[in-house]
Image (tube, rainbow, N blue to C red):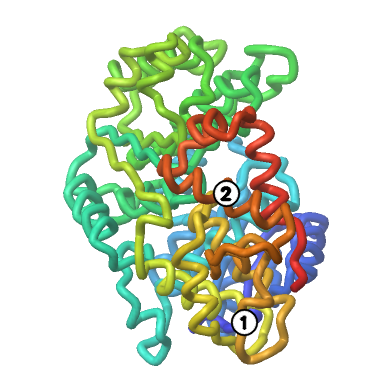
Amino acid sequence: MLSKNNPQILVVDDSLEMIEILQRNLTTAGYKIFTASSAPDAVRVLESTSIDLVITDLKMPKVNGLDLIRHVKENYKDTEIILITGYATIEGAVKAIKTGAEEYLPKPFTIEELLTVVKRTLDKLMIQKKGSNNFEEKLSSQYGIIGDSEVMRKIFALISKVSLTSVTTLITGESGTGKELVARAIHYSGKRASAPFVPINCGGIPEELLESELFGHVKGAFTGAVETRAGFFQIADGGSIFLDEISETSLTMQVKLLRVLQDKEIFMIGSRKPRKVDIRIIAATNKDLYSMVKKEYFREDLYYRLNVINIELPPLRERGDDIILLTKYFTSKFSEEIGKPTPEFSTQVLKVFKEYYWAGNVRELANVIQQLVVMIDRDVINVTDLPYLMRFSLSKESGFDKPLVEIEAEYIRNVLNSVNGNKTRAAKILGIDRKTLRTKLKQFVLGNNGS
């Protein structure tokens, strides 16, 4: 069973320096760390200790990381694996991922990248291992996604249908609505579930590096290419690749992605020989791609290739009582993480949550609840504990005892509600530009937090 407050991680690497770095940073992050300098040593630790996560290097003497991954998957079904690899060979890296590693980290990686991958893997494991005595199992949840509203039941039905095929899928919706969660649900409930799922943030990789990261390069292809290195498409071969923020790719890159969709093959930088890939492509965006096509910012042929199946995720404000289910889930999750008793929310607070606009959607709700769980030490969280704009949304009564900033906040929120959250239209009505509107919204949400 996953440890409540202190997940147990086994780090396996023949480099004592790498072990020391990983152990120091993971221990600082609150994890209990065990170490092994070889696969046989790791097996002995696994036999005597309940391990939640194994982080292993691929290249080790005698028994390598690939054999260890296979052993863990065959004997410890409740233990996840993260593979560390420098992609010494393309085929070796791909095979290791397919053998059963949940995530991978290419060398070199930052501490932030390490902690992000570890947290994501353990979060998934925690959802899978929830015991029947925990309330989360009583919540309506499919594919690890909390929700019981009619609109989410339609999303679940779409996921069920789409996952039976390998059809290219475009997931759309506002920022923070859970597009990657849906992409993972499609992959892990389909026939490619045992193969890699590789998420890529297209907007987070510099344009000059994106082609190499996606398609790989051969040794000597450019200055600094000291070895042949696989790209994300090779790593995902047989599985699924998730291209988040697809709208941020350049027109040049869009041509190359179109070729992959049409021909199911890629060209590594520096190679004239195409490589076939068997891959499912799931793309996502929070922008209106069709409008971008009309403005010639996005290729029309690529748009139609991506938009075979469209799953449009609803904003949180349209999900009704799902807000309450998610509030309970995040409250329990964050309380467990920091070892505090789980607080309750007053009826008035839950009313505020249901009426609030939630510009940042589920991500914003999670951030607000995490802040409250950390900062409030009482058993019950009241309206006076909430951020400023949420406190104000409880009462719509008119009067002359409100500061100007409160009246302004209410008016802006009402305008946004009247245009279904369209910031461009709201800014036009308010007589300000979108940048000013965003600044005001940020001030209202993150500004005063006292009563």
Q: Residue at x 49, y 83 (%)?
A: 347
Q: Residue at x 56, y 53 (%)?
A: 83
Image quadrant where residue 74 sits: bottom left
Sequence order check, earlier mark of 1 and 2: 1
How far across and down, in percent of the image, does residue 176 sit?
Answer: 50, 50
Q: Residue at x 59, y 78 (%)?
A: 44
Q: Residue at x 68, y 12 (%)?
A: 222
Which mark is drawn over residue 382?
1
In this view, 286 is above or below 180: above
368 and 273: which one is in front? 368
Q: Residue furthest front?
A: 400
Estimate how packed mark 1 is, as few (under 14), some (14 to 19) or many (20 or more) residues with alpha carbons within 10 Å: some
In this rendering, position of residue 416 left or right of residue 420: right
Q: Which residue is mark 2?
A: 411
418 and 207: which one is in front? 418
Amino acid type at image mark 2: Tyr
In this view, 143 is above or below 93: below
Q: Which secondary structure lies at badge 1?
A: loop
How far across and down, in percent of the image, does residue 98 sit?
Answer: 40, 48
How far across and down, in percent of the image, does residue 418 sit?
Answer: 42, 44
333 and 319: which one is in front? 319
Quadrant of the snapshot with the C terminus: bottom right
Which mark is drawn over residue 92?
none
Estimate how packed mark 2 is, as few (under 14), some (14 to 19) or many (20 or more) residues with alpha carbons within 10 Å: few
Q: Which secondary structure lies at badge 2?
A: helix
CA distance for labels 1 and 2: 24 Å
How far across and down, in percent of the image, does residue 327 sit?
Answer: 49, 73
**Disc number lying in front (1 or 2):** 2
Q: Are marks 1 and 2 in contact (CB under 8 Å)?
A: no
Amino acid type at image mark 1: Asn
Q: Is residue 68 visible?
A: no
